[in-house]
Each structure stands twice: as C-alpha cells, then as structure tokens.
Image: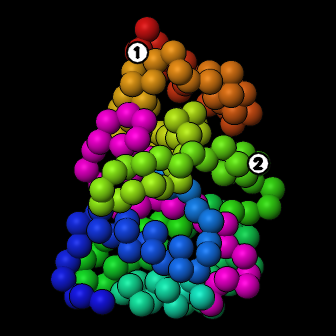
Amino acid sequence: MSKKTLDITSFLKLVLEALKASKVEYMIGGAIAEWAWGEPRATQDLDVVINLPIKSIGKFSKELEKRDMLVPADIILDTIAEDRADIPLNAIHMYSGLKADLYLMREGDALRQSAFKRRILVDYGSPIGKVFVHTPEDLIIYKLMYLGLSGQPKHARDITAILKAKSGNIDLQYIEKWVTQLGLGAIWDGLKGNIS
C-alpha cells in the first residue's frame, strides 16, 4: 500500500475494499450519505454502520491493516462484549489521518436495524461507484439525534438541505414515528418550520 496521503474519496474506497474483501455488510451515513440526498459538503471522516459477525472480525481487522488502518481484532471483540453506549470503533489511516467511525449493529437497537433494512444502493459515479447509504429519512433521524446531543449547526443545515432537495419525496410518517419515540419533536418542528 502506498504511503502517500489520501483524499476522502480515496479513503472511502479503501474502507469499502476492506469491507468487500471481508464480506461485511455496511451502510454509509454522515456527510457522505448527505452527498446523495442533500448537498455535498467537505468532511474529513466517514460514518459507517457495519454488520460484523464474530466469525468475520479477524478477517476484517487484517483487511483494514493491509490498508494502513489498525483496528485489532481484540479491540473489536472488547467493544462488542462491553455492549457500551453507541461509541464507534475508529479506523484511522496512518498516513493521512483520515478516520472512519465504525458503528456496530447491536441487538436491541431498533432504529439502526430499521435503517439497515432500508439502506439504498446509490451510484456516486467514478471513482466511488455504487455504495449502500442511509435513506434520506434515516439520515434525517440520525442528524436530529446528533443535533439534539451536540447542537452543531451542520446537522441542521444538512437536514434542511435534504428536505429541500427531496421535497415531496420524503416519508414524513416514518420520520415522525421515530421522532416521537426518540423525543425529538421540538427539534424536528423547529426545522420543519424553517422549510415551509
């Protein structure tokens, strides 16, 4: 593997290669998914949900290492065993500093399981190609959660961009079901008010 620095697109390709080589199902979220549904914005990291069976952990760890990201198998196992809060594994590229936040599928996480079942294969064209991403609805729900936790305005901007770009093609009932369950009504109502 070349030790030259990477841009975010080349880094995404490396992560996707590792996932494919180890036969791990995935779904891209965050700013990269935003490129499909809202508007492109710069990012220095990837958000990736992975459905990682125990039997694939060693292979996945080795495939990442081949691509200059060190995520030891025992760290992955510890993360699974701890069943801790939704804190991702960090796969940091040693030469560029770019980072993939790897979120593990967990039993009992109904929202993530629902989002994973609904993921969509989107063609980003060359050089990325076809990639599984969050639906616009699920991306909105996660961004509402992060907005509620962090207050970072980028999440509000992303949600607004998706709602404008996908106007009339959003399953509002699905979003509102989760908004109610997650107690995000006030944040959601404020953002919807900005669009109308």
Q: Quadrant of the N terminus?
A: bottom left
Q: Is residue 144 above or below residue 176?
A: below
Q: Residue at x 81, y 56 (%)?
A: 108
Query: Which residue is at the front of the view, 123 or 68?
Result: 123
Q: Is residue 168 above or below residue 139?
A: above
Pointer 1 residue: 194
Residue 27 among magenta residues = no
Q: Is residue 188 above or below residue 101?
A: above
Where does the image place residue 57, in percent across and percent down from the top left? 64, 84
Mark 1 and mark 2 lie on one chain; the one further toward the N terminus is: 2
Query: Which residue is at the front of the view, 32 or 86?
Result: 32
Query: Which residue is at the front of the view, 87 or 113?
Result: 113
Could you tell me the amino acid type at mark 2?
Ala
The CA distance from mark 1 to mark 2 is 29 Å
Q: State which region is magenta.
A: 31-58
Q: Which of the 4 image quarters holds residue 45?
A: bottom left
Where does the image place residue 54, in percent across and percent down from the top left? 73, 81
Pointer 2 residue: 110
